[in-house]
Image (tube, rainbow, N blue to C red):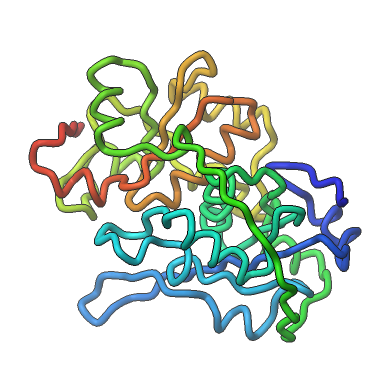
Amino acid sequence: MTDLPTPLVSTDWLADHLGAPDLVILDCTTVQEETPDGSYAFVAGRTSYDDAHIPGSVFCDVLGTLGDKDDPRPLMMPKPNAFKAAIEALGVGDDSAVVLYDRGIGSWAARVWWSLKSYGFDRAAVLDGGFKKWTAEARPVSDAAPEISPATFTPHYRPDRIVSKEDVLNAIESGGATLVHSLSHKEFTGEAAPMPRAGRIKGSINAPASSLVDPDTGAYLPQEKLAAHFDAAGARKSQRVITYCGGGVAACNNALALTALGFDDVAVYDGSLAEWTADPDAPMETG
């Protein structure tokens, strides 16, 4: 069984383990496209995958297969049987070692990583630096889709990893958790307002997920810099941390970084601001 470092693996590690019989590599690329009205939407990055991907990797349509299709809220965690079917279709089984990557800052890979973790699967890691670092190092790529081996995945849901709006309201009332807004400072203050209501969930601190990586290499910052980033924001290991963003993706990147730093009581608010701002009574702050 492949000894998989987690939650992050290096490009060196992956290069050394390409072809391992239990290794499943998932390309989780999702891209942002402008719409006719000038706004933007996220779409599956299948075209990028078809052009070139890490050899042996399988394309993971995060939006199309790893969201609850019966829930009107965007990209909510699928029910256990739906998640099981989607993950098995990618070749992931109970004994797999899974490496995830994307072509951005790792947020979409982190979303799948957190989804697996929320269903009790810990043998998964995000490729540090993703496809950007892999190709910058002139490592091999392929345009061939691999044959997917049959797999059996057994979900063991961990409800403490994914929280609801009610859980967040309880946390605000009790003060029992630190709420981490994972988007930009302008969105945190309300200066930028892409959601129906401007600002942040009441009592939140701001730690933008966009600040987790080196913009030149795409790799996560060294641990001491990551620690300083969250420390300056006000996150403490002694308290439960709940991350959120617009739709539950950037929040997973922060959850991954916090896990890498040794925070052991971390959850993601799955509905995030898409759900929160739709409720006029859900408390928010600006400024």
Where does the image place residue 171, in percent across and percent down from the top left? Answer: 30, 23
Q: Is residue 242 above or below residue 108?
A: above
In the image as oriented, which residue stretches furthest toward the left? 280
Q: Nearer the viewer, residue 76 or 189?
A: 76
Would residue 214 be found to the left or right of residue 139 on screen? left
Judged left or right of residue 121, residue 66 is left
Residue name at image x 42 percent, y 70 percent? 32
* Residue 57, image quadrant: bottom right
* Quadrant position of residue 138: bottom right
Q: Quadrant of residue 130?
A: bottom right
Instruction: List the single residue furthest toward the right.
Output: 16
Residue 18 image offset from top left, x and y in percent: 86, 65
Q: Residue at x 44, y 20 (%)?
A: 234
Q: Is residue 162 above or below residue 228?
A: below
Q: The C terminus appears in which quarter of the rendering?
A: top left
Q: Position of residue 260 (x, y in %)?
A: 65, 34
Residue 146's x, y, as percent? 75, 80
